[in-house]
Image (tube, grey):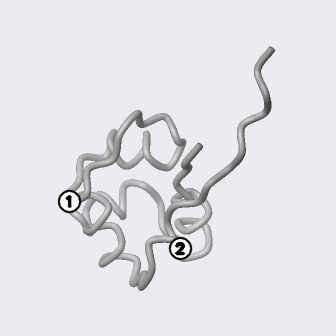
């Protein structure tokens, strides 16, 4: 499954969800859900705003693939 690394990035850059919300114009609850990986979908527009605000150059800095354990 795809996961955002937003919580880790915020920690590394010493930011919180509220600060990123103000930097990007994205609603705080949306940023919070994205950081907690509770979002079901991410808009390309929001991902772009986050990449710009955090100074990221590659989408792999923001999104990672994590294998899900096999379901029985």
Give the number of the disc on residue 69.
none
Q: Find disc 2 in the rendering and name its residue.
A: 61
Q: Are marks 1 and 2 in contact (CB under 8 Å)?
A: no
**Whole-percent x and y of residue 19?**
36, 63
Sequence-wise first label, 1 or 2 = 1
Residue located at (40% from left, 33% from top): 40
Q: Find disc 1 in the rendering and name its residue.
A: 45
Out of 49 and 42, give the one closest to the viewer: 42
Q: Secondary structure at mark 2?
A: helix
Q: Quadrant of the N terminus?
A: top right
Residue located at (55% from left, 73% from top): 14
Q: Secondary structure at mark 1?
A: helix
**Whole-percent x and y of residue 47?**
32, 61
| Above or below for 51 versus 44 | below
**Whole-percent x and y of residue 15?**
48, 68
On the rendered structure, is 1 left or right of 58?
Answer: right
**Whole-percent x and y of residue 26?**
23, 54
Other residues around mark 2 within 10 Å, as few (<14) / some (14–19) / many (≥20): few
Other residues around mark 1 within 10 Å, as few (<14) / some (14–19) / many (≥20): few
Residue located at (18% from left, 59% from top): 25
Residue located at (49% from left, 66% from top): 62
Corner quadrant of residue 29 = top left
Out of 52 and 28, give the one closest to the viewer: 52
Spatial separation of the CA atoms under disc 1 and disc 2: 16 Å
| Above or below for 63 versus 36 | below
């Amino acid at each position: 499954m795809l996961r955002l690394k937003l919580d880790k990035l915020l920690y590394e850059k010493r930011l919180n969800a509220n600060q990123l919300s103000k930097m990007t114009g994205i609603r705080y609850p949306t940023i919070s859900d994205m950081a907690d990986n509770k979002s079901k979908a991410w808009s390309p527009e929001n991902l772009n705003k986050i990449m710009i605000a955090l100074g990221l150059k590659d989408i792999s800095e923001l999104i990672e693939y994590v294998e899900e354990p096999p379901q029985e």
